[in-house]
Image (cartoon, helix red, strand yellow):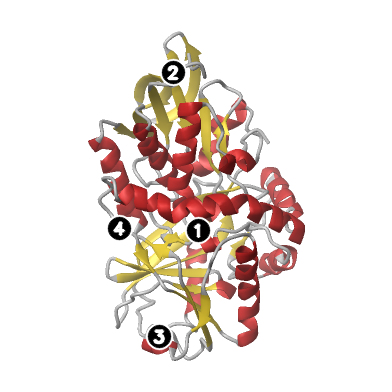
Amino acid sequence: MYSRARKPQTAVVVGAGMVGLSTAWHLQEQGIDVTVVDRSGVAAGASWGNAGWLTPGMAMPLAEPTLWTYAAKSLLDPTAPLHIPARLDVRLWTFLARFGLHATSKAWKRTMDALTPIDRMALEAFDELTGNGVESWTRKGPFIVGFESESESKPFIHEIEQVEKAGQSVPLARLDNPRLKVPQLSAGVSTVLEMEGQRFLEPGPFVEALADAVRSRGGSIISGAEVRGLRHGPGGIAVDSYGHDPLSADVVVLATGAWLPKLARPLGVRTQIQAGRGYSFSVATEEPAEFPIYFPARRVACTPYQGRLRIAGTMEFRGPDEPLQTGRIDAILAAVRPLFTGMDLEQLEDLWVGPRPVTPDGLPVIGATRSPGVFVAGGHGMWGIVLGPATGKLLASQIATGTVPAELKPFDPLR
């Protein structure tokens, strides 16, 4: 049985995405033997097909003061980036009501202040991984931020100013002659900014490399085992799964993303987590795509990806296991057609949908549950990739020492 009187020797991490594998790697750093279990496989949830942005300067609360106006328009526009299915779903509408309560300037600032300490750790946490056996890379920007008018850029500039007031440095400057640097931009993009101090990666390959590093240090990764419950016993915590024999460990970490409530709610984690599904695909470009591109007004993020351009967007509040909705792909295409040139938007590859775990207050849930020895790490929304390594480092420290790091206190799972 887990006890804070002694350091745990073994751990099971449920979830093989960026958050789960980062936690596993850092538990190994603490001298703890780790087994990772996932119902599908490495990077199979929200990790594989997202934009791969390491942008702590943009890791800000999703609920912001213009939400109600924006959400109302989205209900009437099937091509809007925010998509809420028109159906009776009590849990969804309860979540949206709670989400909306945090769409105030005061709540936004409070949440931003809570996120800033872990945001500031984010890039250094990636350097720690790549400097110690994770055979992958992160690449510096700049990030190209495009608008169809000068006035359209003002809300984004204001957001970045608020992020800087909270304690981050996010250099932002106007880019003259942007098509010399980014020939994919059409003439419809009239105002372009350049954002420095951020990075990007190819998320699937990076998470696979992280999994390889965990294995190389003696860890096991079990795919195709869906955890159905936990039991305390004399030999520790038993982890029961469909598709695999029971496992046992001193501690268990639940890092199952949008599926977290199924296992965590009975353990006292009452914060609602809703799948906010993102979509992506990749296209060929006539000229090489070298830099990430963001269109804030259209909520579209684009990233160089294996010789192509990955285009990602939308926030669709729908069940995590529901099938891909082709209408969401069409909505992203409709958004980018006026903004791009010199690319084939008819031949799409790598179509993907992934469920990001969104909380009403915009804060993740990281830390101990009411069940001794059981911890959770999730609810990062769109920021699971960028905050995953820092999350893993902090949570592993808490598990090994019994002391909650200051950076994690706002993310108490029992709040």
Give the quadrant of residue 23: top left
What residue did someone put label 4 on?
A: 137
Query: Does dot 2 land on a helix, a strand or a loop?
Result: strand
Query: Does dot 3 land on a helix, a strand or a loop?
Result: loop
The first of marks 3 and 2 along the sequence is: 2
Discs 4/3, front? 4
In this picture, residue 349 sits left or right of residue 165:
left
From what the image shows, is residue 28 above or below residue 289? above
In this picture, residue 56 sits left or right of residue 163:
left
Residues under numbered marks 3 and 1 in contact, where contact means CB atoms less than 8 Å apart:
no
* Residue 278 disc label: 1
Q: Give the amino acid at mark 1.
A: Gly
* Residue 341 disc label: 3
Residues under numbered marks 4 and 3 in contact, where contact means CB atoms less than 8 Å apart:
no
Residue 294 picture location, percent across and down: 49, 73
The first of marks 2 and 4 along the sequence is: 4
Residues under numbered marks 2 and 1 in contact, where contact means CB atoms less than 8 Å apart:
no
User: Which residue is at a point 51% across and 86% down the rendered structure image?
Assistant: 189
* CA separation in Å, label 4 and label 3: 29 Å
Give the quadrant of residue 185: bottom left
In this orientation, does residue 39 appear?
Answer: no
User: Which residue is at a point 61% across and 75% down the rendered structure image?
Assistant: 157
Discs 3/2, front? 2
